[in-house]
Amino acid sequence: MPKRIAVLTSGGDAPGMNAAIRAAVRSGLDRDWVVYGVEHGYNGLVSGQFRVMTARDVGGIIQRGGTILGSARCPEFKTVEGRRKALRELNQEGIEALVVIGGNGSQTGAHALHEMGFPVVGVASTIDNDLVGSQITIGVDTALNIALEAIDRLKVTASSHQRAFLVETMGRNCGYLALMAGIAGGAEAVCVPEFETSPEALAEVIEEAYERGKAHAIIVVAEGAKHNAQALAQYFIDHNEALGFALRVTQLGHVQRGGNPGAFDRILATRLAARAVEEIDKSNYGVLAGQLKGEITTTPLAELVGQTKGIDPYLFELAREMAY
Ligand code: ADP
Ligand code: F6P
């Protein structure tokens, strides 16, 4: 009997998830295993939405954003009963191991299933880059480049009109996307959840940039910052702040998630998912395939649960220094 494994994508989709599905399927097929795709993340796991994947099913998808399997948020999987349902479905199909491609929440779910005795290996994939166990996760690089393209364009129109733009990035509770977009986009200020910037302090930064003769001010604000972009704009209106520049707000939102993956994410996804299948082959379960110090590594899922990767204070300071 050939070994049967399954692969799913869960949580917020990330550019490169398709490349990861392709790699998991083809690495499994290379070992003469049967590989199932699970539709719509953990929703498909609890309701038995499995389909056998062939090499052709994953053809022509490496360059596509999103996930051909679909993704979802599944509250039921957070309950023991939900996970028991998933176990019943997996056992009924004779599936022996599962690859979970997803972010922090998804890997917490993977760990919970593994704790119930099922062999699971995770693949680090989220644009938020908040997962301990991988310095960079699948989707981050592409999302960052999308944010940068927007910032570059906003800077053009900002300069024409001597305006300040509050540009809000995604990232949930992690400021990584905002910080890196701020550094690479030459922002005048960056607001992240990890380091608080008061509206008063930010007003001062914008005003000083105006006084130094800048034609624009770009402020990148992480959605999880204490004061998000809308709140900051409202504060400036309510307090009649004399910023110098007129102010506009742009929320990048899901635009950042929807792009086609760049080379970095395609390669990272291919390597991480292939490594996940290798770990299954070695019966090394309950781990996350990630990248640490340039190497493809595995970290026990137990070490990630409840953790959020922080951002480098040096880089936050560098963003400030470069804004002069
Ligand atoms: P991401 O994986 O992108 O961080 P979420 O945090 O929304 O996305 O998590 C995706 C899914 O993972 C959730 O909808 C849920 O099904 C599962 N999950 C999250 N946290 C847990 C948990 N504590 N226990 C079991 N499953 C969880
Ligand atoms: O986890 C990825 C992410 O895009 C976060 O950055 C964001 O907070 C969240 O998902 C948005 O979720 P939804 O797609 O459910 O609106």
Image: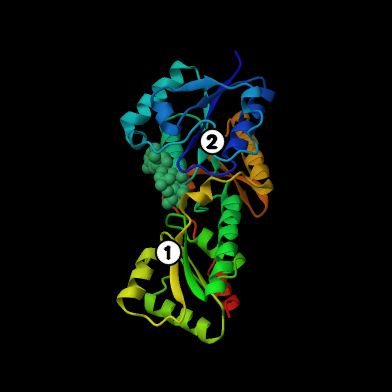
Q: Which residue carries the number 1 mark?
A: 193
With respect to residue 68, does 192 lie above or below?
below
Whole-number angstrom distance, CA of label 2 to CA of label 1:
29 Å
With respect to residue 175, does 294 lie above or below?
above
Residue at the outermost top position: 1
Q: What element carries label 2?
A: loop
Q: Identify the image quadrant of residue 33.
A: top right
Camera-nearest residue between 32 and 265: 265
The amino acid sitting under disc 1 is Pro
Note whether residue 30 is visible. yes
* Mark 2 vs 1, N-terminal side: 2
Determine the quadrant in which ligand 1 lies: top left
With respect to residue 291, does 68 lie above or below?
above
Q: Which residue carries the number 2 mark?
A: 67
Badge nearest the viewer, 2 or 1: 2
Note whether residue 305 is visible. no
Ligand 2 neighbours mark 1 (CB distance < 8 Å): no
| Residue 167 x %, y % | 48, 64
Q: Is mark 1 on a helix, strand or loop?
A: loop
Camera-nearest residue between 48 and 189: 189
The amino acid sitting under disc 2 is Thr
Q: Do the residues labelled 2 and 1 touch (CB within 8 Å)?
A: no
Coloring scheme used = rainbow
Q: Which residue is drawn at 62% across and 37% down?
A: 19
